Image: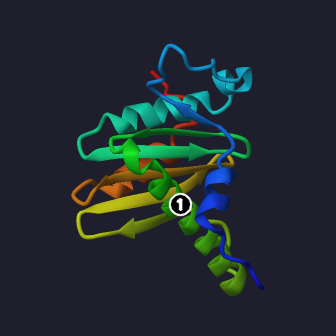
Amino acid sequence: MSKTKKTREELINQIATVILENATPDAPPAPPELDTKNQSLRENLAQIRSLPGVTGYILKDQATAVFDMEDSANLVDYAILASETFDAYATLTAAFELGAMENTLVECKEAQMLCTTVDEASVAVFMEKNVDSKEIAIKLQTQAKPVKN
């Protein structure tokens, strides 16, 4: 089980397409497949992003990455952190036969990151330490289910 560690440049290149939520008027239009793919998840993430204490998210599938970050100057660092977290979990699950990931929470002194997979898309939500990560996880996992009135 020899896995080589990716360099910063390789991780940057791995993110094939980044779509800015607040794109400038000169920016090229989003690829057509992004208009419908993961649309309900993107809408749910936008609602989660508006919650107090949630500082951003990264949504990544096989071909694209979408982000909305309060601190977009450090986007590459956030993307690397999320990518390394998903890779580390994959290594641990293979080594210890843990099964599929439900949620992974990385806690720091003042912030936390919740990583999960929703409909085969990788999601990392960044938030302040006082935000209830369990509530965010529930909102993410129930996003695909229609709400009955």
Residue furthest out toward the right? 1
Residue plotted at (63% across, 18% down): 29
Q: Quadrant of residue 47?
A: top left
Residue plotted at (50% across, 13% down): 25
Is residue 134 shown above or below 28? below
Q: Quadrant of the image for the N terminus?
A: bottom right
Q: Report the front residue among 84 and 138.
A: 84
Q: Quadrant of residue 86?
A: bottom right
| Side (left or right) of 140 relative to 1 | left
Query: Disc 1 designates what residue?
Result: 80
Total labels: the figure holds: 1
- Where residue 127 appears, as percent x and y from the top left, is 32, 52
Residue plotted at (49% across, 53% down): 76
- Where residue 117 appears, as percent x and y from the top left, is 60, 53
The kind of residue on which mark 1 rests is: Ile
Q: Report the front residue among 87 and 136.
A: 87
* Label 1 secondary element: helix
Is residue 103 shown above or below 19? below
Q: Quadrant of the image for the C terminus?
A: top left
Q: Report the front residue among 15 and 46.
A: 15
Residue plotted at (44% across, 58% down): 114
| Side (left or right) of 52 relative to 117 | left
Q: Quadrant of residue 27?
A: top right
Q: Which color mode does the image show? A: rainbow
Q: Report the front residue among 111 and 70.
A: 70
- Where residue 19 appears, as percent x and y from the top left, is 57, 32
